[in-house]
Structures are given as structure tokens and as C-alpha cells.
Amino acid sequence: MTDFLGSLKADLLDRRILPILVLLGVALVGALAYAILGGGSSASTPAPVASTVSPLSTGVSASSIAVTQAPTDIGQPVAETTSGSSHRAAGVSRNPFAPLPGAKAPSASTASEASAGTSAGSGSSSSSPSGASTTTPGAGSESSSGSQGGGTSTPESKPSPSKPKKQTVYRVAVLFGAVPAGSPSPSPTLTPYEHLKRQQPLPSTAQPLVVFRGVTAGGKSASFTLVGEAILRGSAACLPNASQCQTIDLKAGQLEELEYVPPEGTPVVYQLQVVSIDASKASASAARRIFRAESKAGLQLLRSVGLSALPGMRYSADKGVLVFAQHRAFAGRSLIGRAHMAAWSASL
């Protein structure tokens, strides 16, 4: 045993092994120093433990990013990096769930508009980390806020609807009745007729002697068609001529006597006087009703005796007055008839 230890000592003291012994001694001293110094500092601050996520448990590839556990001290903010190391971030810490200054949650109408715009393809929506959504309008779509376009939008002013024009309507009042033969003035027995309707027979439907046809343009006169033969005396103008008087025309204030001679009996004289032709304004709808109003019984009577047409005149339903027909309507008339029409037109 003594020989073995002696040979071992001799080998250790050999010059070739001496450097190795020195290195082992230095390593031993360093290990002791590290154990003493490192053990004291680790008692106050625990060493960070690296935890990796298993690719099999999460279903991701083997190149998943390692996540380091944050220290328990909340006052020291850290940042997670792909390498797994942590470092202190600049600035103060903040709650990630608190909204940023100036950001506000979108309203229900804004959210519905953003979803509608996304489905229609007119724009794209993106959400910020604070939860506020921002809608980017696409090409051709209008901005929902005036500040996005750099100004406020001004609604277009609509033109105010113009009031409908009123039309002129005429109301005729007459006196009609039997008078003693040769009486120069109207008799108190004359019956007044106001607001005459076109084709209205006078004095009644049972005893029609004349039929009111309307007023001429401008309300200058009133026209009446004679039913049957009568002897005329007065200032009325006749159409188509004096020898074939079918229609008489009277101005306001004029009167005409009509003497009817029955086949058997005493002649009876009737007097027709136009009291007034009043013009007034009415709405378009009211004027149309007045223009279209007419007596059906009087129209049927005129058709039965073949006097529904006015000689040389026609009724204008747009204006509610009688107007002269075109010149070709007089082509078949005699020269006397045309001269009478010209004279009657001049008298109006």
C-alpha cells in the first residue's frame, strides 16, 4: 500500500501532470465561489423558468414561439420576444383593456352600416386594439362623416312647388218669362235663373223654348239655341244668319222678345234678358267640374231635334267658353251667312 501511494505521489508531482493539477485547483476554487455568491442572490429573486408549449398539445408546428413567464413584480413591465428573453419596456405600464384617449365604442347604427358595407363590397372594416372599429369607404361610396372629407356636407335645397294656376269661370244670370204683347219693359212676372248650366232648357224641361249653350270667349255674351220657330224682336245676334236663326247671342243687359204662335191658339210673347255675366277665379279641379257640368235632359232634347251642334262655333272644354270654329267650317255657307257672321263677330 505504501508503495502504491508513493508511486502515485511521484506521478502527480511529475512536471507533465503539474499544469493539469493547477487547472483543477482553479476550477474547484471558482465553483466554490460561484456556489457561495450565486446562492445568496437566488434567495431574493427566483430565476425565470422558461416554459414551452408542446406542439402536440396545441396542434401547431415544432417551430412554435417560446413564451417566458413574466415576473411576479407588476411594477416592472416586460415585453415578450420570440427569443424567449425579457427586457424592460420604455414608458409606464397601462391596462391593455382600457380604451385609448379619443377612441369611443361604435354605436349600433355605425356597426350596422359597417356590416352592410362589408357585405355589399363597398368598403372594408378593421378593428383597433381598443375595440373601436374604423370603416374605410370603398370607391364610389360616400363618407358617413363630413370630417372625413375635410368639410361639412350641405343638403341640396329643393325648389318649392309652384302653386297651381287658377282659371276663370263664368256665371250667367237671366230673367225669362211670358209678358203681355207689346210690353216695352220686363214684367215683374219674369222668373230669375242664376248659375245657368250648359244645355239647361228654359223655362223648364217640360216646356223647353230655349237652351243655354254657354258664354263666348272673355265672357262677352251668352248664347241660346231656339227650340222651335219663333218671331224675334230685339238686339240679339243670330246664327248662322238672320233668315235661319238657330242661335241668339245676348250681352249682359240686353233682352230679346220671342213670340211663339201655336197651331191653334193665341200667340204668346216671352222675354229673355241677360242680367249679368260674372267672371271669377277657381282652382283647376273646381274649374274642370264647372266646365264639364251640363244638363243631360237639355242635351238629349237638342239631339232629338238635331240642334246639338252650334253653327260656326264649338265649345272648348279646356277654357269653358264658346270659340269660333275654323274658316273651313263656313265653306258650304252662303255669302249672306258669312257676312252675317263677320258682322256678329264685330259686334262682340
Image (cartoon, rainbow, N blue to C red):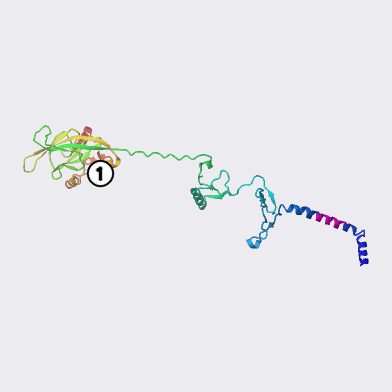
Task: Give the magenta range.
Answer: 22-32
Task: Name the quarter where the N terminus is drawn.
Answer: bottom right
Specify the quadrant of the image occupied by residue 288.
Answer: top left
The residue type indicated by label 1 comes to Arg
- The residue carrying mark 1 is 292
Q: Position of residue 17 (x, y in %)?
A: 90, 59
**Nearest to the observer: residue 127 or residue 306:** 127
User: Which of 34 and 299 lies nearest the eye of the viewer?
Assistant: 34
Say if the magenta span includes residue 33. no
Left or right: 94 as drawn, with respect to 146: right
Residue 73 screen position, x and y as percent: 66, 50
Q: Quadrant of residue 331?
A: top left
Determine whether 125 is above or below 153 in the image: below
Quadrant of the drawing holding the C terminus: top left
Q: Main secondary structure of the magenta part?
A: helix
Residue 250 in percent (x, y) is at: 19, 35
Observer able to see residue 39:
yes
Percent x, y of residue 177: 12, 38
